[in-house]
Amino acid sequence: MFSQDILKSVIQSKPVIHTPDVYIRMVEKTDNEAIFEYASDPDVSKYHSWDPHQSLQDTHGFLSRYSEFLKKLQKLEFGIILKEKDTFIGMCGFHDFSFDHSRCEIRYVLSAKYRERDLLTESVSALIDFGFAKMDLNRIEAKTRIEDIASQRVLKNVGMIEEGLIRERMFLKGHFTDFKLYSILKREHHRPKYN
């Protein structure tokens, strides 16, 4: 079963996950400028809870907060690095951990420059493989705003099942927002691709 000890071990090992087009490694403070490049794009933050970063200071603040969440075993974020250019193009990671129930939520973001390729599906699929194989999770969840069709497509492509609508779950950017809930279980995940 997933546990705090397993998560601590994963963090200490600083894993690198390889796929044909990207590698995924833990986020570092030196990623500040690369994160700002896409996080400052209003099109990228459109369906997320955060507003576009206005300066590198915003990104620095994000990384400082993340460092605290990591220490408290509340979040685990990975950078998505495009192999052909060795370029940081997005992030994916786990949060909302339940150690008692071997469950967490997955989330992700990708630079608008690389949306034409299926790099997000590749990255999320690899992270799900990792979550079941190396972290011994039983259930991985994802929430997406109902209007975010591209994100829903990614979740379906990686084998997640739509469970239903969560009505007005969050107050975001001036209004209450509905979400769709997706999940995948370890017993449903028959053919890992990258682990």
Image (tube, rainbow, N blue to C red):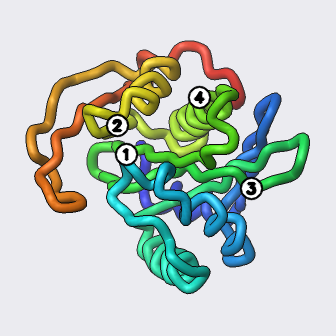
Q: What whole-number distance in Å separates the C-alpha atoms at marks 1 and 4?
A: 16 Å
- Asked if 25 appears above or below 68 in the picture, the reply is above
Residue drawn at (37%, 45%), measured in percent from left and top?
105
* Image quarter of residue 69: bottom left
Amino acid marked by disc 3 = Phe
Q: Nearer the viewer, residue 38 or 32?
A: 38
The residue under label 3 is: 88
Label 4's element? Answer: helix
Q: Which residue is mark 4?
A: 121
Name the residue tied to disc 1.
Answer: 105
Instruction: Name the amino acid, label 2.
Output: Glu
Camera-nearest label, 3 or 1: 3
The outermost residue toward the right is 84
**Can you identify the residue that label 2 sits on?**
141
State the SS at label 3: strand
Please indicate whether residue 192 sits to the left or right of residue 187 in the image.
Answer: right
The amino acid pointed to by label 4 is: Thr
- Of labels 4 and 2, earlier in sequence is 4
Please identify the quadrant where the C terminus is shown.
top right
**Of the two numbered discs 3 and 2 in the rendering, the one whose residue sits closer to the viewer:** 3
- Callout 1 environment at 10 Å: few (<14), some (14 to 19), or many (20+)? some
For the residues labelled 3 and 4, the Cα–Cα distance comes to 16 Å
Which numbered disc, 1 or 2, marks the residue that appears first in the sequence? 1
